[in-house]
Amino acid sequence: MTTNPVSSIPVVYVVDDDVSVRESLSSLIRSAGMAVEVFASPFEFLAKDTLSDLSCLVLDVRMPRLDGLALQEKIAGLGREIPIIFVTGHGDVPLAVRAMKAGAIDFLNKPFDDTDLLDAISVALSRVSKLTTERSESETLRQRFETLTPRERQIMFAVAQGKQNKAIAYDLCVTESTVKVHRHNLMSKMNLRSVAELTLAIERLKK
């Protein structure tokens, strides 16, 4: 499965073998202003080539041939990070614990309150949005770091270690004014305003 560029309209995928459940969930989700795509089986969902980046999955637990937990494992094995909300007509604490440990957003027993499902979907989509933003910011940060010269990188790490300009100049066998110039340039290229921001940037670059 691949992903499409982030859309302004969230997409909720629903996998449930009960047609009446698919229809009711589709109606509920659309009424909340979101797009929805329904699938009668996990295999139909797995056959879909592309998924929206801004999406989540509402997944029935008990289905023939391949149950919801097995689909959760397959999705993880494919490297997908789509958040999952489980729904089930069979309250089963061990299953719920297993699903949540594997990263599920929520585990709702049928019949559930519409508000509870919409709240869970909201949490799931917020998590996706936050993760997408963090990844975009990290990529921008890495691209900026690539513009630094080897000397600017040396000074960047030295500053993050708390070293003063004079000490850095001594270590690098350059003048203090040279260090100041490089320091100004690297802060400008990285779009950083303080040592605290610089230190945080380095921590993010290590991830």
Image (tube, rainbow, N blue to C red):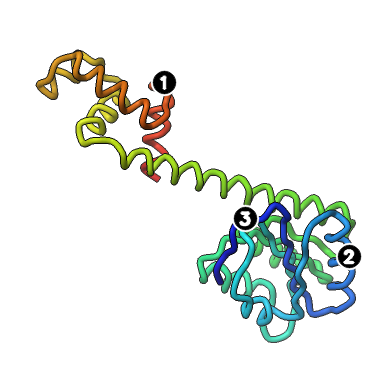
Q: Mark 2 points at which residue?
A: 27
Among the 4 quarters of the image, the one containing residue 200? top left
Q: Mark 3 points at which residue?
A: 6
Residue lying furthest left in this view? 173
Quarter of the rendering occupied by the N terminus: bottom right
Q: Residue at (43%, 22%) from the top-left corner?
A: 193
Asked if residue 206 lies left or right of residue 179, the reply is right
Secondary structure under tag 1 reads loop
N-term-proximal mark, 1 vs 3: 3
Q: Mark 1 points at which residue?
A: 194
Q: In this view, does 65 lie above or below 204?
A: below
Label 2: few (<14), some (14–19) or many (≥20) C-alpha neighbours in 10 Å:
few
Distance of label 1 from label 3 (alpha carbons) = 32 Å
Q: Disc 1 marks which amino acid?
A: Ser
Q: Disc 3 marks which amino acid?
A: Val
Among the 4 quarters of the image, the one containing residue 190? top left
Q: Can residue 101 be seen in this view?
A: no
